[in-house]
Amino acid sequence: MTGRILIVDDMDSNIRVLSAKLEAEYYDVLIANSGADAILTARQEQPDLILLDVMMPVMDGFETCRQLKKDPITQHIPVVMVTALDQQKDRVDGLQAGADDFLSKPIDDIALFARVRSLLRLNSVMNELRLRDASGRPEGATAAIASLPKSAGGRILVVEESERYGLRIAEKLGEPYSCQVVTDQRAAAELAEQDFDLVLINLATKEFDGLRLCANVRAKEASRQMPILCMINPEERERSVRALDIGANDILERPVERFELRARVRTLLERRFYTEQLRGNLDQSLELAFTDQLTGLFNRRHLDNRLKELSNRASQGAETGVVLMIDIDHFKNINDTWGHQAGDAILQQIAKQIRSSFRAIDISCRYGGEEFVILMPRADLQSAKAGADRFRKAIGGFEFPVEPDGKTIRITVSGGLAVLGADETGEQALARADAALYHAKKNGRNRMIAATKKSEINQVAS
Ligand SMILES: [Mg+2]
């Protein structure tokens, strides 16, 4: 995976070494010599990843990182802190400033590329989500992304070879997290599919194969999005590279230091929270895209998709169904006499009646104006006609309020039905239902008429 990487360092020699390494792997490299320069470049160029030197004059790496993570335009870009001193305090300060990861100078190539690949992979998922999210909203509106409350905990699955070690980790993690310790690989893979927020796996063990467990967790649908944090021994750098490539999100060196453990867990949970919100926003905007705003029924776009599906199944002989088209009689008069507000209220009332009259598996749509279409999968014409008539009679018996003082009117509906045949498209079936509806109107309205065969209308009024 390629990507644009911003290198931030006050020393030209450092920049030269690092950019040569990255360019040799076909990454696009951007350069900044100071914190202020980094912030400006990040805002303008939107790199996929930032490698940030900690020790810089004027504005150091921590402050630069804090500012990048505070700015809505740059906060999603992963930041890797490059620290000269491999000190725990730097790591903790960096994580608190919002850094996503660390590399120590001199930079080890294997570690560098493993981190870069893992973060770029994550970033591409996030970008995809952000783009889809942004496309679902009106221009100029930005996503309302909340941050994870400070007090938020999480359920953590700790996979350790001995229960005693596991419990020690759980103790270090402490409040507000609740931990379950498991020592068996198979049990761990099953538990990971349940209601946990993060899995913590010890890779430095002979009792089970931690890398295989990582792969299992990633492979299963129920745990695919689960954050994985792996613990390794410092001398096992190869394993951590493998783990990151298999899908671990982060690596923690043993012996596990309490602050670093808590900071890394927190960062992973925040990232998951952020991604889930974007997914949530996405679901919501998808829902909006397929729903009619006024009535809450499905819209025509959704109908088109479902009709296509259903008629495909019908053409394969798998199952058939009925399509019903409904129109409110003399609706134009209602709008003209009582106003659009009264008309809208009637449309909403009718939508409500549609929802309660038809089966749960039926797909109810507002087709446009005062027209509705009900798709009835697996229904036969006779029972569909009976359902349509029950709905028609329910509407006929209803008093629709049209004025605040309680004035009500009665209205009627007409409809046409057609079976989804094996030898025609959904559109053709819909056209036959429409033709049947036309006959219902011609024959005095307040009736449901079924088209029995292709282009032949059964004119039996009810
Ligand atoms: Mg420096």
Image (cartoon, rainbow, N blue to C red):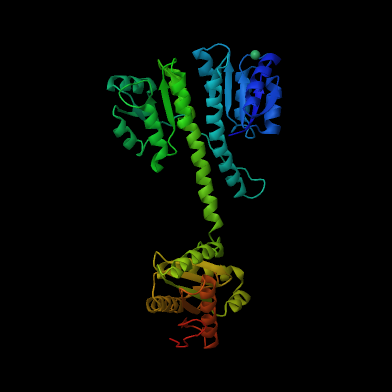
The x and y percentages for residue 250 are 47, 26
Quarter of the view holding residue 402: bottom right
| Residue 247 seen in the figure | no
Nearer-the-camera pick, 454 or 396: 454
Nearer-the-camera pick, 35 or 401: 35
Ligand 1's quadrant is top right
Residue appearing at x 43%, y 76% in the figure: 388
Q: Residue furthest front?
A: 24
The x and y percentages for residue 23 are 66, 26
Residue appearing at x 57%, y 42% in the figure: 128
The x and y percentages for residue 296 are 51, 61
On-image quarter of the N terminus: top right
On-image quarter of the C terminus: bottom left
Is residue 86 rendered to the left or right of residue 387? right
Quarter of the view holding residue 427: bottom right
Quarter of the view holding residue 235: top left
